[in-house]
Amino acid sequence: MARIVMKFGGTSVAGTERIRRVANIVRAQAAGGNEVAVVVSAMAGETDRLVNFCREANPLYDPAEYDVVVASGEQVTSGLLALTLQAMGCKARSWLGWQLPVKTFSAHANARVDEIDAPRLRESMAAGEIAVIPGFQGVSEEGRITTMGRGGSDTSAVAIAAAVDADRCDIYTDVDGVYTTDPRIVARARKIPYVSYEEMLELASVGAKVLQTRSVSLAMKHNVRVQVLSSFVDDGAPPADTLPGTMIVSEDEMQKILEESNMERQSVTGIAHDKNEARVVLTRVPDKPGAVADIFTPLGEAGINVDMIIQNVGRDKGETDVTFTVPQAELARAQALLEDKKETLGFNRIITDSKVAKISVVGMGMKSHTGVAATMFKALADRGINVQAISTSEIKVSVLIDEDETELAVRVLHTAYGLDAKDEAA
């Protein structure tokens, strides 16, 4: 018997037939004697529809009222799933964010979980009741409904799993696990059975769309075992406990798994790509102490995330060029902010390019394997792919390239690091 939190994304609950399929998966877990809580997203496309209503009503909408509107999508799904489970003879009820409550702080539309009061929820689960909870929403200190940003249901599920001391959190989505790269680009991409929190956090932050970055960070903080599975399985498929998804675990557990299987860790676990990047170049910036701080301080204060940063060698006249990347959606705002401060910052002009992509190789094995970056640069150079910027961490190397070369770069690197799945005959 285990205590399990299950989360189903928008594509998994897109309509009553899919909700019925989800209900069957949930019922199977409860029938096995497990204590079950279910976190659901809004039906696919529903949040976009509600956001558009807000924009039509008032382009300069109040974020607090925006949250009231968009949170309703998850509320509908949770009620429908509870009704479907009841029709199947299951004991189930819905719990809205304010009923638990899921206490949040920070801004509306991008709230963060502070704490969850879960005694009543634990009692309900222990009594055999399936709890159905709308993801993405919580309640502020002022008692107003809040939402957690796109992908927030992943964070809701992990936070609830931590609050009820769940044995694991199963994230059901439209993919059946975490792959070495996007299988739509590389047909021979392999599903990874186990990934460490650190690796998944890096993969999520550089473009892998399987999990929201904040949910992985929260899982790592509270040591919540997270499993990624597909909800699109046949009715006669085995329960989640036996499905070969991807388990996201602590580094200590990962080491034990490797030791028990007598396997050595590969240098690279996966390759991610992100086309939602934009490059900004400020030319002839004064080459003096504090100049770079003057550029990035206002960007930080405006909440604009800056990723790759390159400062060229100073010119003869005490000037330099500064290159960095921002999310594509923030490019116009960043450009306007910098143009407004042009005289103060002292640069000559701004050059921007939104037709770029970030390619990243990630793996804890980088700590013990040398030459990972060299392999990346050589593989790209051999195919004539120019690197425009580079950023690194202890377990990640990212490069900025032309957007048109994204798929080629991913395929080339996947092969270069030996990640291609072997043929069955081999």
Image (tube, helix red, strand yellow):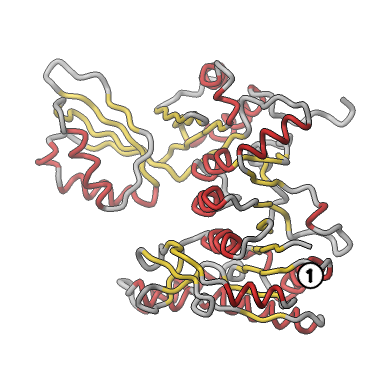
Residue pointed to by mark 1: 30
For the residue pair 215 and 325, the one nearer the viewer reads as 215
Q: Give the residue at x 59% y 34%.
A: 271
Q: How far across and down, in percent of the image, does residue 212 sit?
A: 53, 53
Count the marks: how many?
1
Q: How far across and down, in percent of the image, does residue 122 sit?
A: 63, 72
Residue 194 visible in the picture: yes
Q: Amino acid at mark 1?
A: Ala
Q: Secondary structure at mark 1?
A: helix
When the figure is inspected, residue 397 is found, relative to residue 111, above or below; the finding is above
Q: Give the residue at x 64% y 29%.
A: 414
Q: Is residue 23 left or right of residue 51?
A: right
When the figure is inspected, residue 276 is found, relative to residue 115, above or below; the finding is above
Q: Give the residue at x 73% y 50%.
A: 176
Residue 48 visible in the picture: no
Q: Give the residue at x 74% y 60%.
A: 231
Query: Could you tell me which quadrant the C terminus lies in?
Result: top right
Q: Is residue 128 left or right of residue 93?
A: right
Query: Could you tell me which quadrant the N terminus lies in?
Result: bottom right
Q: How far across and down, in percent of the image, does residue 294 sit?
A: 18, 39
For the residue pair 235 and 90, the one nearer the viewer reads as 90
Q: How far across and down, in percent of the image, does residue 7 sit?
A: 65, 63
Q: Quadrant of residue 130?
A: bottom right
